[in-house]
Image (tube, rainbow, N blue to C red):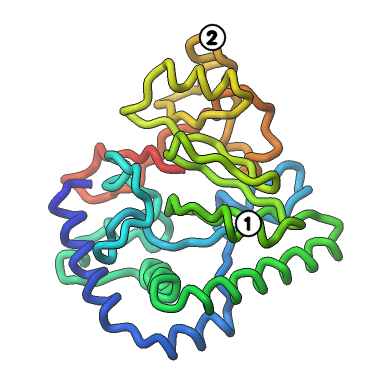
Amino acid sequence: MKKATYKNIRTAAIKYYKSLDINEVKKEFLKQGLLNQNAKLAKSKNGESNNWGLELVPSDLIGSFNFCGQETTCKFECLFFSGTQNILKSNSIIKGELSHAIKKRIRRAFLYLTDQGFFYSLLAQNITNKNEIAKLQGQKVEIRLNVFSDLDWTAFMDSLTEIKFYDYTKFWDRSSPSNCDITYSASERTTIKQIHEKINQGHNVAMVFNGKLPESYDGIEVIDGDLSDSRMNDKKGCIVGLKVKQTVKRKEDKNTFTNQY
């Protein structure tokens, strides 16, 4: 999207964020929980896993706190703005209107920033419950804490050693605990040398391709990352290939694509 469009969305998001009441937001998520599944998360390898994600907000959408930190042009192309309630399908954003889905993500982020003790306790409980249900179904639960954000959850994941986590990150120096599988995300700033370094260390690197995925990239095997969201089940030392996804439907932004996952 254009920077001006993002600015309009951000203005509306900040206004909505400032209108929220912490007690009402707590009641909502105590009842509904913090986790959800979307179309991508629902894709698990052979149905063996039960994937759930935490949808917060990207970048500086709701104020000075940055939920990412290493974002590039993806700030304007994030999948946060896609889906069946894509607010960019019309000019409603110009009037300061946000979709229900986006408002709910803002409310989660509000709870995270306003009462982290409550947020972490509830999140741990939600994850534990999902894990117990998955066991009864003969599955294993897999949790992605950064669906749209890029926060460091290391301490939280260390407190839930039984749970399997996975994530993408643009922080190339970020390491992960033993119960988390990280896929490093390449951007327009990433060099071939950086990619090879990660691959040689046994990590995977996600890259977006326009059109058919190649079998290899600069001598590195490319696997199809759109078949499943269960990144921890991927063959290691590979490029995780993702097809470019269009998120913007507005006429003036018709050629905008995303490099988010």
Secondary structure at badge 1 equals helix
Residue at 32%, 54% in the rendered image: 59
Q: Earlier in the sequence, mark 2 or mark 1?
A: 1
On the image, numbered disc 2 is attached to which residue?
219
Horizontal placement of 234 versus 171: left or right? Answer: right
Secondary structure at badge 2 equals loop
Say if 45 sits above or below 224 in the image. below
Residue at 60%, 28% in the rendered image: 203
Nearest the eye: 34 or 85: 34
Say if 147 sits above or below 261 in the image. below
Q: Quadrant of residue 51?
A: bottom right
Residue 88, x across and y down, in percent: 27, 57
Asked if residue 100 can be seen in this view, the reply is no
Disc 1 residue type? Met
Disc 2 residue type? Gly
Residue at 78%, 48% in the rendered image: 48
